Amino acid sequence: MAPPLSIEALFLTLAAVWLAAGLLGALAARLGIPAVIGELAAGILLGPTLLGWVTPAPTLTALAEIGVVLLLFEVGMDTDLSRLRRSGAQSVAVALAGFVLPFALGFVGAYWLFDLSLATSLFVGGALTATSIGITVRVFKDLGRDGSPEAQVVLGAAVLDDVLGVITLAVLAQFASTGQLSAAGVGRIVFFVLAFVLLAPLAAKLAAGLISGLARRHEAPALLLILVVSAVLAFSALAHAMGAPVILGGFAAGLALGRGFRIDIPPGLRLPFGATLRRLLAADPGFSQAVETHTRPLVHLFAPVFFVLVGVSLDLRSVAWTDPKVASLLATLVVLALAGKWASGFVLRLPRRQQHAIGLAMVPRGEVGLIFVQLGATQGLLDTTVSAALLATVAITTLLPPFALQVLYRLKAPRAMGAE
């Protein structure tokens, strides 16, 4: 872990991060490239790959976590819940395929083709299951396709993929530390994660009703923003405490505060404080619009820190590119990583272009893949060769899909594609 930054170093680093992200993001957009590519490039420029000015210090990492949580909060608010419900079965199918296929391919490739140990092969397979939901949703936004049917399928699939990834990471960590798996430990992790996924939107909706009442009763200028951000961070902390990804807390809060989320209590059902509960759980489009207006600038400020830090974490100079073993392992892992996720789009009976779009959008590994690599290396299960090959695989599969999606959407007008 990088040492803490002094206050002046922190200020200068943040200035460099925001300036580089803003300029390269704007340049990318001007060139017709998704802005997130410019922000990832800013991280590669500032990080150890090129200039070496920025390291993933604890303070920057915390700000990056806030950025991705707020980004998923915005995604939750913008999500058309009716479309998400309609794509539910499709999202589950894509998530399961996008989890099982890369894991199986990665494990078989590492174990049988390169004769790696069982534990190492399991970590390689686990690293290939990762999908970075932050990068995925940002690419769709940059391309103006965040409201498309394929984006809704991918959003649901990526959320479920994150849940599966956290469970897998916890199981592999237990296996690495003890050499065996405990059914009770795995069951406890699964129970808490699923409990949060099911109950968090309801709790967030109740919190939203309370926030709305407080904001209307008091005219403090920034009270609404303070209350909303506090709720988002609280739900994210609760998600982490229950073993779920922190981003699920932000996403659940965004869903609950969005315009289309409501929970109807049957009129004949008598509950304590029934009238109050009905009021708190009802949809409130005016309040949702106010929340969106107040929070969006904050999202646009913090989210780029996350994408820059992903680029900073990719030390491409550490990869022994000329080592034949690294090159062969890297080429194999990249092919398996692309094929496993890309194929997940083809489990659905959809037009061919939408299948390609869904599969490509599931490919980016980003920070989730880096966590697997870091854990495997710290546990002594990944040697320098395997770590370097996996690191480069994460980098390639993070940077390639945004370009591929852009080419895919340019092949045919978006309207025509959506109508297929």
Image (tube, rainbow, N blue to C red):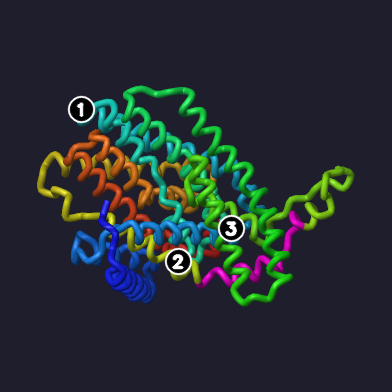
Tag 2: amino acid: Asp
Q: Give the Cα separation between the discs numbered 2 and 1.
A: 42 Å
Residue 11 in view of the camera: yes
Reply yes or no: does residue 291 show up in magenta: yes
| Residue 361 in the figure: left or right of residue 146 | left
Q: Give the Cα separation between the discs numbered 1 and 3.
A: 49 Å
In percent of width and height, residue 266 lies at 84, 46
Image height of 86 relative to 39, above or below: above
In percent of width and height, residue 256 lies at 64, 55
Magenta stretch bounds: 280-297
Q: Is 188 or 144 nearer to us in this picture? A: 188
Callout 3: SS: helix
In percent of width and height, residue 213 lies at 73, 64
Tag 3: amino acid: Ala
In percent of width and height, residue 362 lies at 43, 48
Residue 407 in view of the camera: no
> Tag on residue 142?
2
Tag 1: amino acid: Asp
Camera-near label (1 vs 3) is: 3
Callout 1: SS: loop
Q: Are marks 3 and 2 in contact (CB under 8 Å)?
A: no
Instruction: Return the residue at label 3.
Output: 231
Query: What secondary structure characterizes most of the magenta part?
Result: helix
Which circle's residue, 1 or 3, is located before the other in the chain? 1
